[in-house]
């Protein structure tokens, strides 16, 4: 406990989105999930991942930007006040963190360096291990 801020905000733990999880588990395409659940940051992040893998940088950026904003909305509804932990270990948080990561990656691909720095700080402030976990494919 030494060095830990005991007065800091409690971790934000988002509620599970069973409908989105179920749709993705049966192989529903991210675009179809977005059409059915446009509030899902996970669905937007997966759509951004797909566009990125196909070399569609601008679309990947746009999809990730929507996922980022949907993620901020979810965090605020979950009690987040602009700072504090958003643990990767809590599965429902992963959509938001993946959207942040997708936006960071897309910003790097179009040379938006200041955004990359800001999103790296955001991700590290949310969970120090999130970037490594996403890059490891967890």
Image (cartoon, rainbow, N blue to C red):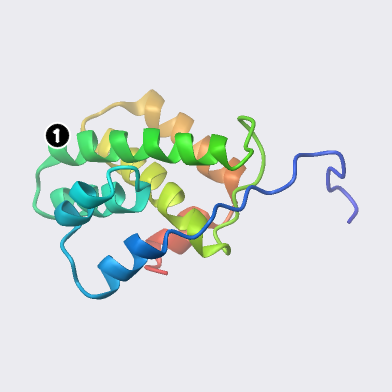
Instruction: Please state which of residues 138 and 86 is positioned toward the viewer in this rendering.
Output: 86
Residue 120 is left or right of residue 111, and the answer is right
Where residue 15 sits: x, y (%)? Answer: 54, 55
Residue found at the far right of this picture: 2
87 lies above or below 89: above
Instruction: Please state which of residues 31 and 35 is positioned toward the viewer in this rendering.
Output: 35
Residue 80 is left or right of residue 71, and the answer is right
Residue 99 is left or right of residue 48, and the answer is right
Q: Residues within 10 Å of mark 1 (few under 14, many from 20)?
A: some
Where residue 85 sits: x, y (%)? Answer: 65, 46
Q: Which residue position is annotated with label 1? A: 58
Q: Could you say whether the residue bearing mark 1 is in a helix, strand or loop? A: helix
Which residue is at a point 38% across and 37% down the rendered structure image? Answer: 70
Residue found at the far bottom of this picture: 26
Residue 19, by quadrant, is: bottom left
Which residue is at a point 15% across and 52% down the rendered structure image? Answer: 31
Residue 71 is left or right of residue 22, and the answer is right
117 lies above or below 136: above
Where residue 102 sits: x, y (%)? Answer: 32, 46
93 lies above or below 62: below
Which residue is at a point 21% across and 31% down the rendered structure image? Answer: 110
Where residue 121 sits: x, y (%)? Answer: 54, 36
Residue 138, by quadrant, is: bottom left
Instruction: Please state which of residues 48 and 104 is positioned toward the viewer in this rendering.
Output: 48
Task: Report the quarter where the N terminus lies.
Answer: bottom right
């Amino acid at each position: 406990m030494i060095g830990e801020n005991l007065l800091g905000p409690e971790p934000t733990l988002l509620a599970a989105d069973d409908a989105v999880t179920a749709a993705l588990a049966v192989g529903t395409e991210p675009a179809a999930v977005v059409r059915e659940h446009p509030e899902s940051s996970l669905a937007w992040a997966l759509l951004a991942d797909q566009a990125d893998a196909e070399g569609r940088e601008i679309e990947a950026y746009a999809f990730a930007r929507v996922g980022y904003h949907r993620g901020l909305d979810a965090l605020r509804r979950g009690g987040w006040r602009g700072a504090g932990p958003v643990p990767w270990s809590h599965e429902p948080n992963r959509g938001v963190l993946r959207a942040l990561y997708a936006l960071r990656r897309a910003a790097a691909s179009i040379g938006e360096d200041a955004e990359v720095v800001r999103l790296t700080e955001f991700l590290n402030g949310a969970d120090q291990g999130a970037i490594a976990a996403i890059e490891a494919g967890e």
